[in-house]
Image (cartoon, grey):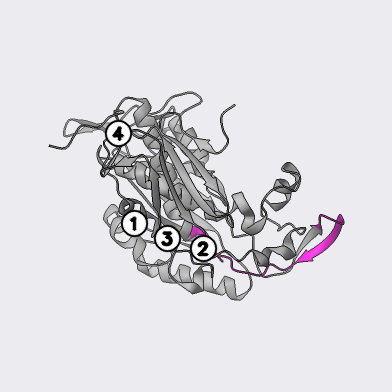
Amino acid sequence: MAAANSFGKAFIVTTFGESHGRCVGTLIDGCPAGLPLFEGDIQVELDKRVPRKPEITSGRIEKDVVEILSGVFEGHTTGAPICMLVWNREAVSSEYAVIKNLPRPGHADYPAHVKYRGFNDYRGGGRFSGRITVSLVMAGAVAKKLLQLFGVEVLAYTKAIGSVEMKETPTLEQIRKETYKNPVRCPDQAYAELMEKAIIEARREGDSLGGIVECIALNVPVGVGEPVFDALDADIAKAIFAVPAVKGVEFGAGFKVAAMKGSESNDPYATRDGKVITLTNNAGGVLGGLSNGMPIVVRVAIKPTPSIAKKQKTINLSELKDATLQVEGRHDPCIVPKAVPAIESMVAITITDHMIRAGIIPKVLARER
């Protein structure tokens, strides 16, 4: 049976650690030898994960300084497993003592308690915390750097928070330049301000918000994917669902195709400069589980953060009686901004895995001249 904390078949990512454990980290097996890689390459991606604005984020601010422990020698990957971690320095576990037996509605506390018979680390959600996205982003940083060598670029941004949703589709240049200029990770600064206000208002009410993240992968070669059970879109969806709080994934036109006719949903083919393209992209860049050469477009629904200050109905697990819960401590009023680089990472990891499996990315890279 495959390990439940590992993903991929050629570029295998295994994550470890808990929210309030000593560290969180990742182990990558199958990264080609010869990739130039430094801790700074990982750090720049990790720094994107946490918005530096206290009004819209958790009061727990970790520095998340990455350490590469293995798999890199003289500035290049060696082909051996790459182990990376960051230490947890700012956890305050006493905040969770009061809810040990009071599972948070909307969180994994209750099913985890049953599955592991109470042995699970409940502090901060343990293994089910948004903190594990640190591990995903570290692995994604390696995948993204590898993909760059083959002309593939993966971009993500916040499309909606609560009822505030971008109506216009941003240009690629907007996404590249503007996304990380604001704490909500939206490439349109006017919408970003409205999203920020919505988060602050929800927090003031003791509540939280969810939203939508859109991710785009550019220049993925045609024919990447391994149908039927390892279809490219199926694996991307599976990878994205590893990001805590994800509740929905759609590609291209997504659920809108249900109301279309075939003549409307089909993407007509054409040639431009000797290259086959489609004139529309309702398929979202994937047909039959294979990339078709068009941008892979995927949208992700993120639910509101379960830990809220409002009183909620729950149960007392030790007494099996109804109870009420008012969550205190440091929690994000909206996890969407932190999810943006995590989703970008999971898409990059999946495409990297499939490009290695297809033989497009070799197991040893050519030396620089």
Magenta-drawn stretch contains 325: yes
Mark 1 or mark 4: name the one nearer the start of the chain.
4
Q: Dot 4, how many residues are within 10 Å of its Cα: few (below 14), some (14-19), or many (20+)? A: some
**Residue 361 against residue 172 in the figure, above or below:** above
353 vs 269, nearest the viewer: 353
Q: Dot 3, how many residues are within 10 Å of its Cα: few (below 14), some (14-19), or many (20+)? A: some
Residue type indicated by callout 4: Ala
**Residue 333 against residue 69 in the figure, above or below:** below
The answer to which image quadrant residue 320 occupies is bottom right
Q: Dot 1, how many residues are within 10 Å of its Cα: few (below 14), some (14-19), or many (20+)? A: few
Q: Secondary structure at mark 1?
A: helix
Mark 3 = which residue? 166
Residue type indicated by callout 3: Met
Query: Which percent across, then down, holds residue 59?
Result: 54, 70
Looking at the rendering, the stretch of residues picked out in magenta corresponds to 316-336
Residue type indicated by callout 2: Arg
Q: Secondary structure at mark 3?
A: loop
189 vs 122, nearest the viewer: 122
Q: Which mark is residue 33?
A: 4
Mark 2 or mark 3: name the one nearer the start of the chain.
2
Mark 1 = which residue? 44
Q: Secondary structure at mark 2?
A: loop
Magenta-drawn stretch contains 31: no
**Mark 1 or mark 2: which is in front?**
2
Q: CA distance from mark 2 to mark 3?
A: 37 Å
**Mark 4 or mark 3: which is in front?**
4
Residue type indicated by callout 1: Val
